[in-house]
Amino acid sequence: MPKPVFVLLHGAWHSPRCWNPLVGELAKAGYSAVTPALPSTGSTPPTPDWSKDVETIRDTVSDLVQEHDVVVVMHSFSGMTGGTALEGLDKPACAAKGLKGGVVRLIYIVAFLVPEGFQHSPYGTRDNMIPEMRTDFEAGIITVRPEDAKAMFYQDIDNATSFGAYWSTTTYAAWRDIPTTYILCTGDKPTTVAAAQHLVDSAKANGRHRIDNVIKVDAGHSPFISRPGWTAATLIQEAIREG
């Protein structure tokens, strides 16, 4: 069987370069990966919402499924945009359209696994945003200081965006229709670990779902940087898992 293509979606505070170590490990095993840049991160001027992220993800995946099976990997914030963008791109739906491929699995890496109608923060507020998220309402942006980044994202790595995206609302939950794996990093911030477990438990209790594996790993928020070999092996294992 042809190998699926991985689509790697970065979080709110990263760029596609964050995936470079993982892309290299996947390539060693003969797998290709696509790492689209999501417009809501680092955009000037700030994006008014996350619609361009959703459009970018959907266009990227739509092109690939013409010929390939696809595994969509989401980190942190992109769980919301990725989960929203994939309606009608699951394997059965694509097959019904006569396409050769389709999305065969979702993999969330400590990402927002949320139902339809979810909004991170009510419009016009910074509710649910942690203190390290520095907000500038006048400029319409959110930033993280370099000195705060390690504790937030890189806990297990040694030392040698706009408001509109956070005020947007999900309209689709791809994990209801596509086989889904959740990677929960126990070395992340304790509040994040608890929140991730809550997201998984809530999704399973929220009606129809295709969540069939939860993997716990002793790693920080960004295992694709701190443990790229392990992450690549895990993604490949999950990519061939029967949904």
Image (cartoon, rainbow, N blue to C red):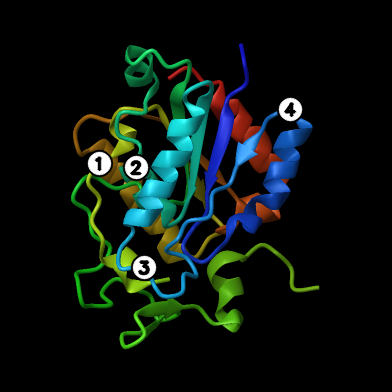
Label 2 to label 1, Cα distance in Å?
Answer: 7 Å
Quarter of the image with the C terminus is top left
For image coordinates 54% across by 22% down, the residue present is 68
Quarter of the figure with residue 206: top left
Percent across and percent down for residue 163 are 33, 72
Label 1 to label 3, Cα distance in Å?
Answer: 21 Å
Q: Which residue is mark 3?
A: 47
Element type at marker 2? helix
Element type at marker 4? loop
Position of residue 233 relative to residue 80, above or below, is above
Mark 3 / mark 4, whichever is N-terminal: 4
Q: Tags 2 and 3 in contact by the CB under 8 Å rule?
A: no
Q: Tags 4 and 1 in contact by the CB under 8 Å rule?
A: no
> How many numbered marks have been drawn onto this rendered protein structure?
4
Label 2 to label 3, Cα distance in Å?
Answer: 17 Å
Q: Which residue is mark 4?
A: 30
**In front: 198, or 49?**
49
Amino acid, disc 3: Thr
Amino acid, disc 4: Gly
Label 3 to label 4, Cα distance in Å?
Answer: 36 Å
Percent across and percent down for residue 24 are 75, 43
- Crowd tier of the residue under label 1, counting other residues whose Cα lies within 10 Å: few below 14, some 14–19, many 20 or above: many
- Crowd tier of the residue under label 3, counting other residues whose Cα lies within 10 Å: few below 14, some 14–19, many 20 or above: many
Q: Is residue 150 left or right of residue 101?
A: right
Mark 4 / mark 1, whichever is N-terminal: 4
